[in-house]
Amino acid sequence: MNAELKIDNKTYLVDFSKCYDISIPLNFNGNQPNTYGVDCASSKPYTDDQFIGDRRKGGPCNFEIYKLIPHCNGTHTECIGHITEERISILDSLNDIMISSTLITITPSITNELYIPNLNSEDLVITKKDLYKVMDSIPSHLLKGLIIRTLPNSCAKKSQDYMKIPPAFFSIEAMQYIVSKGVEHLLVDTPSVDRLFDEGNLSAHNIFWDTKKKKYNSNTKHKTITEMIFVDNHIEDGSYLLNLQIPAFVSDAAPSRPIIFKLNDI
């Protein structure tokens, strides 16, 4: 199915029969990524004295209990309610169905750019310097969504234990630059835009949502961060239409399935 779309007075061609799923499938009771060493996502049949929800054990149907921590067990999308006292839900925040976006690839590096608390000598950081190189010429109408793939990019990300290999994160200057470019939906293949252990500052989160001292800002309620995606190496950098799919969870975050469609110039 081909369609012509007009975005900011420029026309693009989209083939809706071809898409890329950049989520990590959540394999309950199987290999999965993990952050902070929390319990893995799991499932088990519901049972009581008269019923067992497993066809393999003689039950009439499969009827399972699922346990997961969206922030730690795989691809998830979060809203401003992740860091504020106000219980804002992702269901109320994510209103965009199709999002004009750009996919870029970045190699995190050791840097002199700033972070709170101070960077350690071994910290690998996504920097403003490297973002500027690839983003400066991208038109604003293609930056409502920003998808960042980091290098190296192996399939190990689909089951990575991030307590064993600390992930990259964003410098203060990098996140300020992203905000200045008008990005409303940020997608990254790391488990957090901040360092995993940052004394609770969450500097990059707060810059993105403009939540000084984690105070709720109604002007940024519509913005989202999606973490722990996986963008296969065969998917080219460039312009895409993003469909960010979430279940109807009344919670600050939910498992998500970002789907992207290539935007082709006409």
Image: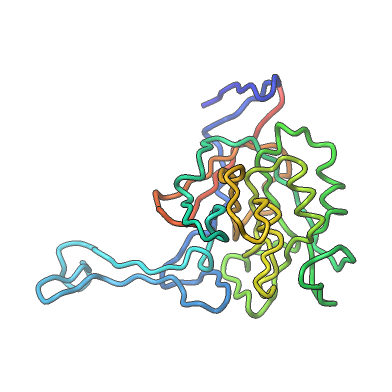
- In the rendered image, residue 33, in percent from the top left (x then y), is placed at 55, 69
- Eyeballing the image, is 37 above or below 263? below
The quarter in which the C terminus is drawn is top right
Q: Measuring from the top left, give residue 127's x and y in whole percent.
A: 82, 58
Q: In terms of depth relative to the viewer, which is nearer, 259 or 182? A: 182
**One can see residue 45 in this view:** yes
Give residue 143's position: percent from left, percent from top. 71, 38
Asked if residue 20 is positioned above or below residue 251 in the image, the reply reads: above
Q: How many discs appear?
A: 0
Q: Is residue 88 left or right of residue 67?
A: right
Foreground residue among 45 and 253 = 253
The residue sitting at 54% across, 40% down in the picture is 243
Q: Residue at x 19, y 62 (%)?
A: 61
- From the viewer's perspective, is residue 2 above or below residue 26? above
Q: Residue furthest left?
A: 50
Direction from residue 134 to residue 253 in the image, left or right: left
Residue occupying the point 52% across, 61% down? 85
Coloring basis for residues: rainbow
* Residue at x 79% of width, y 48% of height: 177
User: Residue 254, can we see it?
Assistant: no
The quadrant in which residue 54 appears is: bottom left
Residue 206 in the image: above or below residue 43: above
Viewer-side residue, 264 vs 175: 175
Q: Quadrant of residue 107?
A: bottom right
> Can you give x and y, in whole percent of width and height, for residue 129 in the image?
88, 54
